Amino acid sequence: MKNNVKRIGILTGGGDCPGLNAVIRAATKALILEHHAQVFGFEDGFQGLIEHRLRELKYDDVSGILQIGGTILGTSNKANPFENPVVENGKLVKKDVSDDVIKYLQDLDIGALLCIGGDGTMTIANQLAQKGVQIIGVPKTIDNDLYGTDVTFGYDSALSIAAEALDRIHTTAQSHHRVMLVEIMGRTAGWLTLGAGLASGADIILIPEIDYELDVICDKVIERSKKGRRFSIVAVAEGAKPKGGKQVINRIVKDSPEQIRLGGISIQLGHQIEDETGLETRSTVLGHIQRGGSPTPFDRILATRYGVAAARLVVDGNMNRMVALRGNDIVSVPLAEIGGRTRRVTPDDPLLKVAEAVGTNMGVKGRISENG
């Protein structure tokens, strides 16, 4: 059934990544050109809803932004209408202002809200949907760990950056005969590290889903050294941890939805490898460089497809769903199925089998499929 919604809102939530502007552009242009709708962008994600900050997006406003990284609307990974921090009687408390947000949308006559983001954004979006707001989700994260879609936009761009970094580290490692560790983002999912490690021919790949064994890693780099390969490249995910051990926490941010900030595993592991093997070891933490810059052509096309598909869902009245990629097809899935679930690397994933087939060490004895 066709929807007569003519005023649509767009926001970008969570961390930034390449491709956000491409989605904004595609959705806005499709809604204006094909459906004669008005489009409004809320600034800084859900914070714009809470603080009543928006601006109309006209056709010319979104022209020329396809290849630009970041988001013209701004974003926030802390804003949440259901837990909005306010100071009362000198104390910081969290209040549910979702009813105020919904009334604001009603006063603006916004008939549908496009929420572009990852797990946190989709969780909040689903909560608003349950209270009557018509929502369309668009999956974004460099970690590629969002449930319901094969690929999120932003992943391919971050993958390219991480792989290039590993390539550059390779020549230094070879020249100085060192063991070089490169720490890659991904939180508790290993997609980014696994993909970058495979693309760059890393000798060892360590991901959160597979607890590594230090002695296996040391044996591998010593074996390579004895065979005349006097360097080794280790791609290590920020969430990787030793068997029986814990993830390395960089800091805890109490006022953030994701309070635990991982980081530093490459430095810790590098010291351990050097102490155990006597081989000179260096570590590099890529950090937020993986989020920046222009999106790859793949992400530009995927984000554009997502944006157009989101616009069509609005017009068709097919609400409270998230657009997704399944194989080569753009589909949609119920928003209620997405929030709070993470897509992680499983022992039977084809990429793991490919890595093992070409001799890549995953930090454990034997094959992953055999270890279960």
Image (spheres, rainbow, N blue to C red):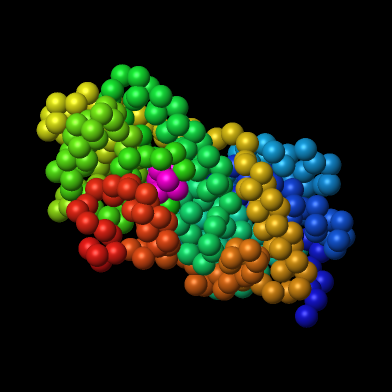
Asked whether 210 or 371 is in front, the reply is 371
Identify the residue shown where x is 77% and y is 38%: 64
| Left or right: where 103 falls relative to 158 | right
Quadrant housing residue 126: bottom right
Residue 259, x across and y down, in percent = 34, 48
**Numbered label tally:** 0
For this orientation, the residue located farthest to the front is 227
The prevailing secondary structure element of the residues shown in magenta is helix
Quadrant housing residue 152: bottom right
Which quarter of the figure is the N terminus placed in? bottom right
Residue 245, x across and y down, in percent = 17, 50
For this orientation, the residue located farthest to the left is 276
Identify the residue shown where x is 50% and y is 43%: 159
The verdict on residue 196 being magenta is: yes
| Left or right: where 23 falls relative to 96 | right
Asked whether 296 or 239 is in front, the reply is 296
Residue 92, x across and y down, in percent = 38, 47
Q: Is residue 352 above or below residue 90?
A: below
Asked whether 304 or 176 is in front, the reply is 176
The verdict on residue 33 being magenta is: no
Identify the residue shown where x is 41% and y is 40%: 201
Magenta part of the chain: 192-198
Identify the residue shown where x is 31% and y is 56%: 209
